[in-house]
Image: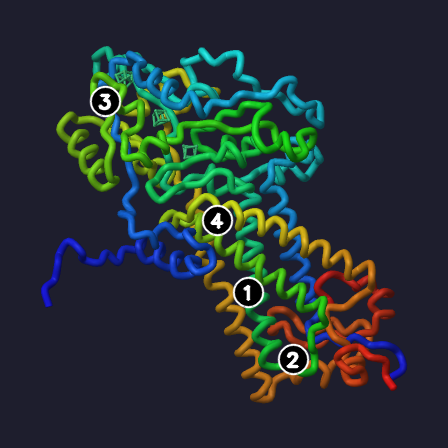
Amino acid sequence: MSHDPSSKVDISRRNFLSSLGAVGLGLLLPGAANAAKGRPDEELVSLHDLSKCVGCGACVEACRTANAHKFPEPVKPFPAMYPASVKVEDWSGKRQVTDRLTPYNWLYIQTARGQYQGQRFEVHIPRRCLHCQNPPCANLCPWGAAAREDNGIVRIDDKICLGGAKCKTVCPWEIPMRQTGVGLYLKLLPKYAGNGVMFKCDRCADRVAAGKVPACIEGCPYGVQEFGPRSEMVAKAHALARNSGGFIYGETENGGTNSLYVSPVPFSTLDAAATTGAGKPHLSPVRDMMADEDKLAYAALFAPVAGIVAGALRLGSRLSGGPKNPTDVAPPRAGNGGEDLANGFGNGLAEGPDAAKKNGRDKEGGR
Amino acid sequence: MSAPQTIIPVSRRVAVAYVAFVALLAVTGTMQMPLASRYQIVAVPGLAWLGDFWLTHKLHYVGAVGLLTLTGYLTTRWVLEWRREFALSGLGWIRVGILVLLVFTGAVRVLKNLPSISFSPTPTMLVDWAHLGLAFLLGLVALGRLSFKASYWASPEASERQPRDGAPIS
Ligand code: SF4
Ligand code: SF4
Ligand code: SF4
């Protein structure tokens, strides 16, 4: 039997877990596990060579034009919100703003000027959502409105988002921007829950789905960005950094993002020199925000197994002469507190409802 | 015996542990919605932590680990030891059903939150909504049980004396 090297099976952890998810859920949620679709499961990455960027803003214009049909058209007057301390965020009258992120401006050019190794520098950095590999905005969205797709694009569904802005709070760069007066919340409880819709770069998902590159990449006259599979782009970024003595941002930040920046000046220097703040993200190091959850996920996976083993051991000890069945040993009266958890949970609690009432014990879980 | 009895196999401590884990999950789960700052809960002394999405998120995982361990333990014991003597009432089975679905939808979310797994947005959203709705339902069942003094356990005496369809005893 011949063996085609191109079809070799990659049993990396990623694929293993993807298959686990696909097998476990594919049956119940048709189309849920994208790993089952047989598409190449490499994420798409954009690589910025910042040494080429002149800050002309053509990419910003291209983004605004290509995505104009996705921009919010809020209904006014905005519904009153309770409590009164809840603030309206309205950018609909400031659509022309291009020097920061807004619901109408998903990309802006951040500029850092200063001195590095005795030389003056001016570096322009196109800033937008970095499309994290494990995005907190999507993982912590309580409403399922934000999601990561298998090609690495992280999107917020503007038909579902309620505008609670949690995604912005948990995003290490506070990227998503809110516009009040649009979206699903208007149809639910506009006074008490929600406050519009969150907007950010969706990596031109519609264009990418049609096989095109994002508008900002196509619109750049200087070829600052390249777009391709992660492994290829990471290799290129490293080669670029090596050859130019440059620095990389985005590869490991927040556990890894699908936007890579290569700069001739260290990012700590750029971060100190650039204006940061609301709508103007920083360039500091970011630890993997989901690292604890990843560990706890494995604990949750093994928790039922531990419980089952403890239950079986308990039976084993009872059969070999340990404490007997609760009804055998526990008289039906109040005050029999049962056994210690550490002792194996199991002795009996047996009381009448009257006793339970008297003791205030008639709680959820007791019976 | 003359007094009505509901004998249950779990110890008081287990019952308390169950309530504690469910309460932790309910509170931290509710706080995944951005309510704490909007409704000034964070201004209440001692409750500022409820506004920390990361802390409540991790605590939700911790609560899940606790509840899953307890569930594994109790299910095993019930199947191996208690099944015959301590049958569940209809309400008890409803609670089990809700818990199973809650665990399933929660597990989907936990899997999805791993760096290596992606699910399509629509099923993810439906799973989120189901998890939220099921938690609400579990609360309703608990409230209903308290207000109607119902039991999650079938009374051993009742099941001995009464036919299954609930017809009057002749
Ligand atoms: S940069 Fe922020 S908004 Fe973009 S994917 Fe990461 S967490 Fe989400
Ligand atoms: S990828 Fe598309 S949406 Fe994102 S900044 Fe570029 S043009 Fe705008
Ligand atoms: S990325 Fe290209 S289009 Fe955008 S500002 Fe830089 S040079 Fe201009």
Going by the numbered disc 1, the residue's amino acid type is Thr
Q: Is residue B69 left or right of residue A127?
A: right
Same-chain status of marks 4 and 2: yes
Going by the numbered disc 2, the residue's amino acid type is Trp
Question: What is the spatial separation of the Cα atoms under label 3 and label 4, in whole angstroms?
Answer: 36 Å
Mark 3 neighbour density, 10 Å: few (under 14) some (14–19) many (20 or more): many
Nearer to us in this view, B20 or A144: A144
Of mark 1 and mark 2, the one earlier in the sequence is 1
Residue A219 x %, y %: 27, 19
Question: What is the spatial separation of the Cα atoms under label 4 and label 2, in whole angstroms?
Answer: 37 Å
Q: Is residue B38 left or right of residue A101?
A: right
Disc 3 chain ID: A
Q: Name the residue carrying label 1.
A: B69
Going 58% across and 57% down the picture, which residue do you hit? B102
Going by the numbered disc 3, the residue's amino acid type is Val
Q: Secondary structure at mark 2?
A: helix
Question: What is the spatial separation of the Cα atoms under label 2 and label 3, in whole angstroms?
Answer: 68 Å
Quarter containing ligand 3? top left
For discs 4 and 2, the disc positioned in front in the rendered view: 4
